[in-house]
Image (cartoon, rainbow, N blue to C red):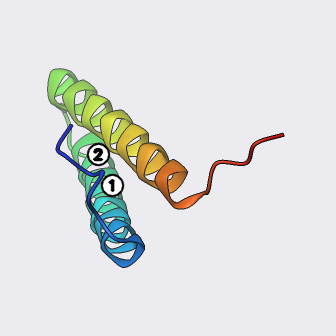
């Protein structure tokens, strides 16, 4: 993953928004692929894998926005 430690909260939110847009576009691509007959199952699996990676990145960035709380 790239160096995100120097990012400001606004930059992190912008990056999250871009990742979520990419996630949504991949979702639409999967739907379009699965409606074509026959569809490329390998391509769908690759897209789903990319979606999961994006989701992981978003969670990582969201965790950066939450301050550490010492109990």
Dot 1: what SS? helix
Left or right: residue 8 compared with residue 43: right
Q: Write the residue at 32% across / 74% down.
A: 14
In what quadrant of the picture does the N terminus appear?
top left
| Mark 1, residue position | 23
Furthest residue in direction bottom, as rendered: 10
**Side of 44 relative to 52 (left or right):** left
Of residues 71 and 41, which is closer to you in this image? Answer: 71
Q: Which residue, as the protein is rendered here, is positioned at the far top?
A: 42
Q: Quadrant of residue 41?
A: top left
Mark with earlier residue (2, 1): 1
Q: Mark 2 or mark 1: which is in front?
A: 1
Question: In x, y percent, where is residue 13?
Answer: 40, 71
What is the CA distance from the residue labelled 2 to the residue labelled 1? Answer: 11 Å
- Measured from the top left, where is residue 46 in percent x and y? 20, 28
**Quarter of the picture holding the C terminus:** top right
The vertical placement of 24 against 40, above or below, is below
Q: Position of residue 32 (x, y in %)?
A: 25, 53
- Relative height, residue 67 to residue 69 (above, below): below
Residue at 44% x, 43% y: name it: 60
Q: 49 or 71, which is in the foreground?
A: 71
The answer to the question of whether label 2 and label 1 lie on touching residues, with beta carbons closer than 8 A, is no
Badge 1 density bin: few <14, some 14–19, many ≥20, Cα 10 Å: many
In this view, 27 is above or below 55: below
Q: Which residue is mark 2?
A: 30
Q: Residue at x 27, y 68 (%)?
A: 18
Looking at the image, the residue that sits furthest to the right is 71
């Amino acid at each position: 993953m790239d160096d995100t430690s120097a990012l400001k909260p606004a930059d992190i939110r912008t990056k999250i928004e871009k990742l979520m847009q990419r996630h949504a576009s991949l979702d639409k691509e999967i739907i379009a692929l699965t409606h074509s007959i026959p569809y490329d199952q390998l391509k769908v699996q690759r897209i789903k894998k990319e979606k999961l990676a994006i989701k992981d990145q978003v969670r990582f960035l969201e965790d950066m926005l939450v301050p550490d709380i010492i109990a």
